[in-house]
Image (spheres, rainbow, N blue to C red):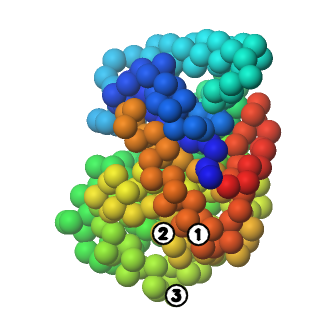
C-alpha cells in the first residue's frame, strides 16, 4: 500500500480546495504522509495562464504559513493520541527556469521545506501546457521531446531539487506521437542519457496518476521510461498531483501495481530534505 501522496495542490494557485480541506481528504485516504507542493511564483517575464492572477509571492507566503501551522497542529495531535493521522510535509513544485538560477536558489533557501520538486513546465520560452502540438509536424514534435529531456538533464545537473515531477509531461497533448517517438533509437539514447544524469544527481523520479486525469490518459512516466529508470535503480516517489479533494491518492492501487511491474518495492518521502524509504 502506498503511504504517501507528496505532489498536491491547493486553492492558493489553481487548485479548488484549502490546505485544511485537502488534508482532511488525506486523513480519509489512510495515508501516513501528506505532502503539499504548491507551484512557485515565477521570475519576471514568465507567466502561466493556469496559475492564479495577482501577486503570487504573497499567495505563496500564505500557503507556506498555512502548511506550517497545520504541520505543527497535526504533530501535536499525533504526540498526544494513539490514533495517528498523516504527517504533514512542506514542499513546493519549483518551475525549473535555468535562465534564472539565483531566483530558484533564493526560493529554495527561503522556507523550511521538507522537499523540493523540480518541474519542467517550460522548455525555453514555451509553456508545455499551452503548446499547440496539433500544428507541429512529427519532426518538430520529436525535436521538442528531445529538447524536453535536455532540460531534464539540466535539472539533474542543477542538482538542488529532490524529486523530478511527472517525467514525461511533454506527452500530455500528443500521446500517440510520444509513443511513436519512444520506439525510436534516438529516444532510447536520449532516455538513457537522462536516466544516467538523474542517477548521478541522486534525485528521485516521480511516478504519478496526474497523467490519468489529462488528455493523454496515462500514468507519468510511460512504461518504457520507468523500465529504463529501474535499470539504473533510480528511486521513485508517488503522487496524485491532485488539485481537489476528490483526487487525493487518486488510483493509488493502480499506481502501486504499475511500479511493481518494474521491480519497485519502495517509495521515497523526504523529511527536512532527507530521504526515507517506505515499503509499499
Ligand atoms: Zn506540474
Ligand atoms: Zn503539480
Nearest to the eye among marks 3 and 1: give it: 1
Q: Is residue 112 left or right of residue 97?
A: right
Q: Quadrant of residue 17?
A: top left
User: Residue at point 77% right, 17% down?
Assistant: 79
Disc 3: CA contacts within 10 A as few (<14), some (14-19) or many (>=20)? few
Disc 2: CA contacts within 10 A as few (<14), some (14-19) or many (>=20)? some
Inspect this view and state whether residue 267 appears. yes
Q: Quadrant of residue 200?
A: bottom right
User: Residue at point 38% right, 73% down?
Assistant: 178
Disc 1 to disc 2, how far (Cα)?
7 Å
User: Residue at point 66% right, 36% down?
Assistant: 32
Disc 1: CA contacts within 10 A as few (<14), some (14-19) or many (>=20)? many
SS for dot 3: helix
Disc 3 to disc 1, how far (Cα)?
17 Å
The residue identified by callout 1 is: 226
Q: Is residue 43 left or right of residue 46?
A: right
| Vertical comparison of 183 with 263: above or below | below
The residue identified by callout 2 is: 222
Mark 1 in CB contact with mark 2 (< 8 angstroms): yes
Q: Quadrant of residue 16?
A: top left
The residue identified by callout 3 is: 185
Amino acid at each position: 500500500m502506498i503511504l504517501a501522496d507528496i505532489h498536491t495542490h491547493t486553492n492558493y494557485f489553481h487548485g479548488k480546495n484549502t490546505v485544511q480541506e485537502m488534508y482532511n481528504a488525506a486523513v480519509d485516504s489512510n495515508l501516513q504522509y501528506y505532502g503539499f507542493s504548491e507551484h512557485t511564483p515565477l521570475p519576471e517575464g514568465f507567466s502561466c495562464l493556469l496559475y492564479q492572477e495577482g501577486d503570487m509571492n504573497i499567495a505563496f507566503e500564505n500557503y507556506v504559513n498555512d502548511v506550517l501551522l497545520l504541520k505543527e497542529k497535526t504533530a501535536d495531535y499525533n504526540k498526544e493520541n494513539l490514533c495517528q493521522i498523516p504527517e504533514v510535509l512542506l514542499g513546493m513544485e519549483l518551475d525549473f527556469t535555468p535562465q534564472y538560477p539565483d531566483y530558484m536558489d533564493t526560493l529554495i533557501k527561503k522556507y523550511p521545506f521538507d522537499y523540493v520538486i523540480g518541474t519542467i513546465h517550460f522548455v525555453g520560452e514555451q509553456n508545455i501546457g499551452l503548446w499547440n502540438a496539433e500544428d507541429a509536424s512529427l519532426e518538430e514534435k520529436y525535436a521538442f521531446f528531445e529538447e524536453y529531456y535536455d532540460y531534464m538533464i539540466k535539472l539533474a545537473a542543477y542538482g538542488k531539487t529532490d524529486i523530478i515531477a511527472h517525467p514525461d509531461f511533454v506527452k500530455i497533448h500528443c500521446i500517440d506521437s510520444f509513443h511513436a517517438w519512444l520506439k525510436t533509437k534516438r529516444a532510447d539514447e536520449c532516455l538513457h542519457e537522462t536516466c544516467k544524469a538523474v542517477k548521478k544527481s541522486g534525485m528521485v523520479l516521480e511516478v504519478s496518476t496526474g497523467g490519468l486525469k489529462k488528455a493523454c490518459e496515462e500514468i507519468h512516466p510511460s512504461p518504457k521510461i520507468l523500465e529504463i529508470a529501474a535499470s539504473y535503480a533510480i528511486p521513485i516517489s508517488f503522487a496524485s498531483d491532485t488539485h481537489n479533494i476528490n483526487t487525493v491518492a487518486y488510483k493509488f492501487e493502480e499506481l502501486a501495481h504499475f511500479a511493481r511491474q518494474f521491480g519497485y518495492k519502495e517509495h521515497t518521502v523526504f523529511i527536512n530534505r532527507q530521504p526515507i524509504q517506505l515499503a509499499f
